[in-house]
Image: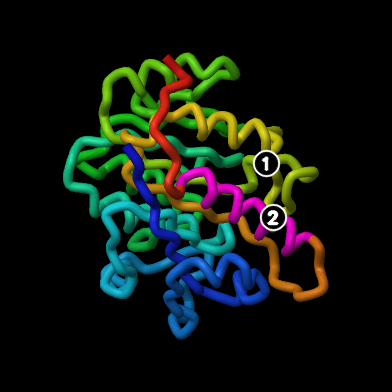
């Protein structure tokens, strides 16, 4: 069985402007005209964003900077069947924010209210104590293995700040994984149960900065991993 994840690139700013190889293979949606939505967004504007972001049954959606990670909430609430979320993020984005807003640091709190969401499996440096439905995945991936055995569909959200500075550089403090470790984790998941992927964590755009080229290379490797990969189960 082969499944292809359609690359969808959301332009909230110029983060992808100089990632020409990425832009050449994905559909681009220009949302730069929407002001006042970096870091946090009024909940009523979420409906406007939802209407402007196209729906694909299977997509790998590029969100730009981690400042826009809350867009994941829009993508998740569209899912109309029970699912689990695998979140790879150096931060656990479940902080309180202003009433009537959602933010890049609070969106997971909103996500836990989605009726079809069962569990969040988390890889990163955040502390999950006190959250019964957020399960921190340890280095041997035992918890993730148990989740995969259920056959429940899995959505994957990746903030590249989960990677160390040698792999990529983002505009937030970063974690401990190297790129090969990330790809190994993702490769171990049967493609047949993955229902969507999103990626954020872009650096500031600069046509002369090697950091941008390195970030683009990570994006292309993620696309290669999910686009047309034959199903196989490594975690068992």
The residue carrying pointer 1 sits among few (fewer than 14), some (14 to 19) or many (20 or more) residues within 10 Å by Cα, namely: many
The residue lying at 55 percent from left, 19 percent from top is 138
Q: Quadrant of residue 219?
A: bottom right
Residue in the foreground of this view, choosing between 44 and 99: 44
Is residue 145 visible to the viewer in this orientation of the structure?
yes
Q: Is residue 231 above or below residue 104?
A: above
The residue lying at 52 percent from left, 45 percent from top is 158
Query: Which quadrant, please, contains the C terminus?
Result: top left
Relative horizontal placement of residue 198, taking residue 51 as reference (left or right): right
Magenta: main secondary structure: helix
Q: Position of residue 66 (x, y in %)?
A: 57, 57
Q: Which secondary structure lies at badge 2?
A: loop
Do residues under tags 2 and 1 come within 8 Å of each other at their CB atoms?
yes
Q: Position of residue 145 (x, y in %)?
A: 42, 18
Colour convention of the picture: rainbow
Q: Residue 170's mark?
A: 2
Q: Is residue 50 above or below residue 154?
A: below
Q: Which residue is mark 1?
A: 163
Distance from disc 2 to disc 1, alpha carbons, whole Å, reads 9 Å
Relative horizontal placement of residue 72, taking residue 23 as reference (left or right): left
Q: Which secondary structure lies at badge 1?
A: loop
Query: Which quadrant, please, contains the N terminus?
Result: top left
Numbered range of the magenta stretch: 211-226
The residue carrying pointer 2 sits among few (fewer than 14), some (14 to 19) or many (20 or more) residues within 10 Å by Cα, namely: many
Q: Earlier in the sequence, mark 2 or mark 1?
A: 1
């Amino acid at each position: 069985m082969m499944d292809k994840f359609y690359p969808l690139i959301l332009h909230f700013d110029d983060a992808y402007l100089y990632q020409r190889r990425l832009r050449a293979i994905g559909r681009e949606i220009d949302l730069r005209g929407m002001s006042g939505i970096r870091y946090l967004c009024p909940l009523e504007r979420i409906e406007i964003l939802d209407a402007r972001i196209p729906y694909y049954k299977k997509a790998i959606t590029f969100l730009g900077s981690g400042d826009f990670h809350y867009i994941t909430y829009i993508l998740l609430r569209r899912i109309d069947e029970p699912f689990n979320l695998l979140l790879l993020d150096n931060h656990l984005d479940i902080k309180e924010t202003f009433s009537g807003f959602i933010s890049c640091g609070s969106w997971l709190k909103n996500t836990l209210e989605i009726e079809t969401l069962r569990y969040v499996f988390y890889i990163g440096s955040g502390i999950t104590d006190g959250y019964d439905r957020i399960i921190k995945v340890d280095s041997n991936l035992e918890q993730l293995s148990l989740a995969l055995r259920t056959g429940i569909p899995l959505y994957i959200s990746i903030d590249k700040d989960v990677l160390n500075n040698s792999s990529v550089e983002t505009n937030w403090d970063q974690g401990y994984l190297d790129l090969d470790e990330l790809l190994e984790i993702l490769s171990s998941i049967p493609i047949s149960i993955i229902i969507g992927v999103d990626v954020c964590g872009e650096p500031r755009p600069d046509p002369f900065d090697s950091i941008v080229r390195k970030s683009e290379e990570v994006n292309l490797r993620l696309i290669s991993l999910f686009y047309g990969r034959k199903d196989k189960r490594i975690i068992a």
